[in-house]
Amino acid sequence: MATTVQQILNNKGGTCHGVAPDTTVLEALKLMAERNISAVLVTEGPRLVGIFTERDYARKVVLRGLASKDTKVGDLMTQNVLTVSPSQTVEEVMGIMTNNHIRHLPVVDHGVLAGIISIGDAVKSVMEQQQATIEQLAGYIAGGMST
């Protein structure tokens, strides 16, 4: 049975960190460093309006010669963010990430932000599935050989 996004959120927790569009890039980077995360969601109240990632920082701040303390996240965030639902499978998530060259997907459940899933979360889930399959097969083979 395929693992769902909801199962991953249940294991890792639905905590996601966000900032307002008028937050400075420097403040967002400090939050990312404190929490050891590589992306923050950009929200206006309960509404998701974008995502700001380390990749955005590298490509949109550093390469353009902008100052992190003077630049607002809202000016550089990725808008029109792709999202997934809790019922989607890890395989679907990995396909979306691969096809769109992204590493983070917010999880939205009936219009409400429920968490965020990263490529690392998806890979970890697939590895756990594979390990469980290996253990089941080994048990089956060992059980069959003892008779």
Image (cartoon, helix red, strand yellow):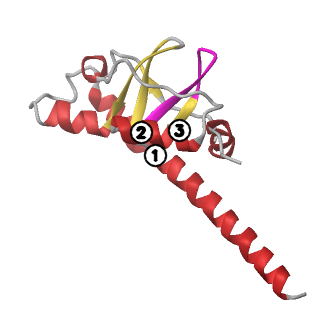
Q: In the rendering, at what x and y percent does residue 54 appear?
A: 30, 39
Whether residue 127 sits left or right of residue 29 in the image: it is right
Of marks 1 and 2, the one in the foreground: 2
Q: Are marks 1 and 2 in contact (CB under 8 Å)?
A: yes
Viewer-proximal residue among 51 and 92: 92
Residue 51 lies in what quarter of the image? Answer: top left
Amino acid at circle 3: Glu
Q: Which residues are magenta?
A: 104-114
Q: In the rendering, at what x and y percent does residue 114 appear?
A: 61, 27
Whether residue 124 sits left or right of residue 133 in the image: it is left
Residue 92 disc label: 3
Whichever of labels 2 and 3 marks the residue nearer the N terminus, that label is: 3
Residue 108 covered by magenta stretch: yes
Who's the residue at 26% across and 20% down the image? 72
Viewer-proximal residue among 96 and 26: 96
Query: What is the quadrant of the C terminus in the image?
Result: bottom right
**Residue position for label 2:** 97
User: What whole-number distance in Å separates the C-alpha atoms at marks 2 and 3?
Assistant: 9 Å
Residue 119 disc label: 1
Is most of the magenta stretch helix, strand or loop? strand
Tell me, yes or no, if residue 102 can be seen here: no
